[in-house]
Image (tube, grey):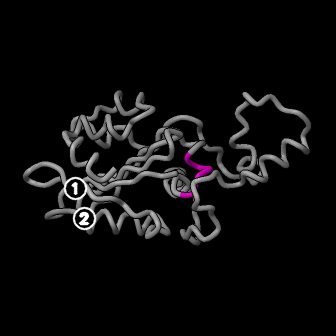
Amino acid sequence: MYFAALLARTEDGWEASDLELDDVESLSDLIDLARSAAVDDDTVVALIEQEDAWFGVVRVDGEEDPRYFVSAASAASRSSYGSMLTDELLGKDDEDDELDELDLDGTEDGEDEAVSSYADDGPDDEGEDDDTDDEVRAGAEPVPSGPLGDPRLLDDLGVSHKQLMTLDGDALSEIADSLGATEVLEGVR
């Protein structure tokens, strides 16, 4: 299950709106939604999380290039919306940025393949991190297990890079608290 919201900075603070992920088929769609939520081309922060497994932050400042951060890249890369972010951050040249091939119900992509690979390889330790095997086999650059992206993207807004790198659990609420946007975020949650 995903939660996503847009926080748009205004003269009077932050405005929040629920981000309908059903309308997002590509990273370009997400950026377009963020830009359309901007007030006078000011900063918009898109926050996405998947059941405390990972969270992502996309910052859009007017027409400047967006900036991205993902808390747990390998977990995000196995989810439909997280893979959009990790692919962008890893510079994967994806001819088709659409999510048609991805499972958008919040389950991890390739779940069935992971089960069959365990069966093929024999018994594995459940505690072992086998997240990047499919990508390594395909010749793709392995996805790091930890944070990926620009941890300084919120420094000037009150969320230090050190704080962002250590967040887990209810990270979006902690980010909103540091931004002074707790009430407006909770209003759309």
Looking at the image, residue 134 sits to the left or right of residue 124; the answer is left
**Residue plotted at (49% across, 37% down):** 147
Residue 44: which quarter of the image? bottom left
For the stretch drawn in magenta, the main secondary structure is: helix
Looking at the image, residue 29 sits to the left or right of residue 117; the answer is left
State whether residue 81 is above or below residue 98. above
Spatial distance from mark 2 to mark 1, Cα to Cα? 6 Å
Q: Position of residue 70 (x, y in %)?
A: 46, 44
The front one of 91 and 34 is 34
Looking at the image, residue 123 sits to the left or right of residue 41; the answer is right
Q: Position of residue 125 (x, y in %)?
A: 80, 28
Q: Which residues are the magenta region?
A: 76-80
Residue 69: which quarter of the image? top left
**Residue plotted at (62% across, 52% down):** 107
**Residue plotted at (44% across, 32% down):** 168
Q: Residues within 10 Å of mark 1 (few under 14, many from 20)?
A: many
- Report the amino acid beneath label 1: Ala
Q: Are marks 2 and 1 in contact (CB under 8 Å)?
A: yes
**For the residue labelled by badge 1, is the local secondary structure a helix, a strand or a loop?**
strand
Whether 79 is among the magenta residues is yes
Which residue is under mark 1?
A: 8
The front one of 180 and 85 is 180
Which residue is under mark 2?
A: 37
State whether residue 4 is above or below residue 121. below
Q: Which mark is residue 18?
A: none
